[in-house]
Image: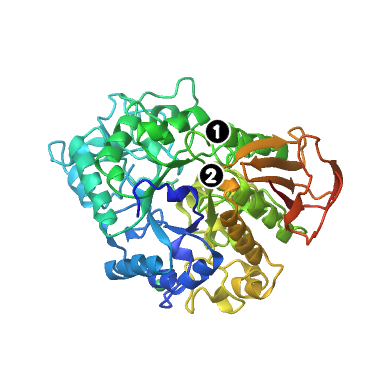
Amino acid sequence: MKKDSQWWKRAVVYQIYPRSFMDSNGDGIGDIRGIVSRLGYLRDLGVDVIWVCPVYQSPNVDNGYDISDYRDIQSDFGTLDDMNELIEKAHENGIRIVMDMVMNHTSDLHPWFLEARKSKDNPYHDYYLWVDPPADGSLPNNWQSHFSGPAWKYSEECGQYYLHIFSSGQPDLNWANPELRAALKDILRFWLDKGIDGFRLDTINFISKVPGYPSVPGAKGLVRGSQFYMNGPKVHDYLHEVYEDVFSKYDIMTVGETPNVTPETALQYVDEERGELNMVFQFEHVNIDQGKTNKWDIRPWSIKEFKSIVSKWQKSLGEKGWNSIYVSNHDQARSVSRFGNDERYLKESAKVLCTMDMTLRGTPYVYQGEELGMTNVRFENISSYRDVQTLNLYKELTDAGVPEHDIMEKIYYRGRDNARTPMQWDSSENAGFTIGKPWIDVNPNYKTINAEAELADPDSVLNYYKTMIAFRKAHSVIVDGSYRECFEESDRVFSYVRENDEEMLFVVLNYSATKFTLQIPDDVDMDGAEVAVSNIGRKSFSGRVLDLRPYEAVVFLKRK
Ligand code: GLC
Ligand code: CA
């Protein structure tokens, strides 16, 4: 394959959360052989790349995002041989494979950390971030962990605090140490040499902390110290070094998870001339409902705001840099429940979101089950929940005296387990995910929302995804065309024109449950334009007055 062919710009990526995808041996946990068994489904869907969430050795405090051995597979998921087989079989099916790599932190059971905490003189001590206990007995600073409580934990063994932005089982690594960086680069090469096609780099903009770990000024109690550890002073030096020494030597794609970036700061990661990453995941649109403090502080939002964020990113990354397009993943609530309407207009609104993802400029990411219109879940009891972030929140708020009902509503709305219930394959027990007892309960709606039923229904969300993925591939204008927004002031319709020398696409998405009439603007050339895609079976159109149905999506195509 030609180097630097930028194949990832034309690709559609499918994200797999292995624990919940397909269980091959009845232990209730999805596994690598389960993924292998569903490669045909993925090939038929038309995706080009699978991104597999972490499958390395891990005590699973955070479901694999706490790695204890980067070079081995955790036994729940299978063996290294299974992984080699997955890589090979995926390639046989024309599917590339991207691994999720967590290098901001390890597990506290990683051998480096077990050594590091033994004493200040241990050779591995400096692989992590330590601070002497302040003389007044306070914590080193006021940073709050993303998973509740302080971001510091005292280690009796060496008499110092270590930093953990996430759970205490996820100590942050010290990227300022060149030996550590060399060790991490070796790990990247280890996997690349097995033939994988790239990495999704977890929380990669957290790797450089502001020296001295300053407290957030003027804050009461514990708060997120994001400005002191996201996009830190050395992050670009470190990433450029990894690019020079590793990434640039392979024909791969890299996408960094980067909360708290603006179009300007994101460009610093993805500008081709700088040599760092191919893409980042920005968070502005998925944090739209987030209040001032953290993700659980929920605020109202509007379609107009949502559109303006998406549009801003379309305009700023495109000619230079590149967008990743997504509305859901394993950390977010289900997209159709959040941005669509999972009751009356479940199918229609899931298709609206799909149409948007598949026609914007950038690489689209589909999260498992999104192609079925899988929804959020409301388990009655907290004992059905599994996510460390959710469980820590529940405890914190219960201790603070917040009523149970209010806590559960937050979890129903934004909890990560919404996205982690098992993939709904068919209407048999446990949705065909396992013959055993699933590690987390299935969403009770699997009897109607499932792959088998949807494959048989020409009008299903799943078949619409297939159509849209094929449509995206057939029209290079989606990859290389310009982007221009229409009806910017509307709080209901998201609409844009994509154009290159051969074709023009006019995309109209009704993000509301009301029908209304649109006058197509004069500067959209509808002469000879035809209905190329419709989520309600619209066949033809003429004139300039469009009567839109609730959650209607329509794409007009004009060949030049
Ligand atoms: C990322 C992952 C998330 C994980 C966290 C810590 O945000 O997507 O699942 O909990 O990093 O590794
Ligand atoms: Ca299993």
Q: Mark 1 points at which residue?
A: 293
The extreme top residue here reads: 218
**Is 172 situated left or right of 144 in this image?**
left
Query: Compared to 198, does 116 lie above or below?
Result: above
Residue 148 appears in view: yes
Q: Name the residue under label 2.
A: 362
Quadrant containing the N terminus is: bottom left
Query: Compared to 215, does 517 lie above or below?
Result: below
Q: Point out which mark residue 206 bears.
A: none
Type of the residue with mark 1: Thr
Type of the residue with mark 2: Gly
**Which residue is painted at 66% across and 38% down in the image?**
306
Disc 2 to disc 1, how far (Cα)? 30 Å
Q: State how many labels appear.
A: 2
Q: Please state which of the two labelled residues, at mark 2 or mark 1, is closer to the viewer.
A: 2
Q: Which quadrant of the picture is home to ligand 2?
A: bottom left
Between 7 and 245, which is closer to the camera in this rendering? 7
* Picture coordinates of residue 243, whole percent (x, y): 30, 39
**Which residue is painted at 25% across and 45% down in the image?**
184
Residue 374 appears in view: no
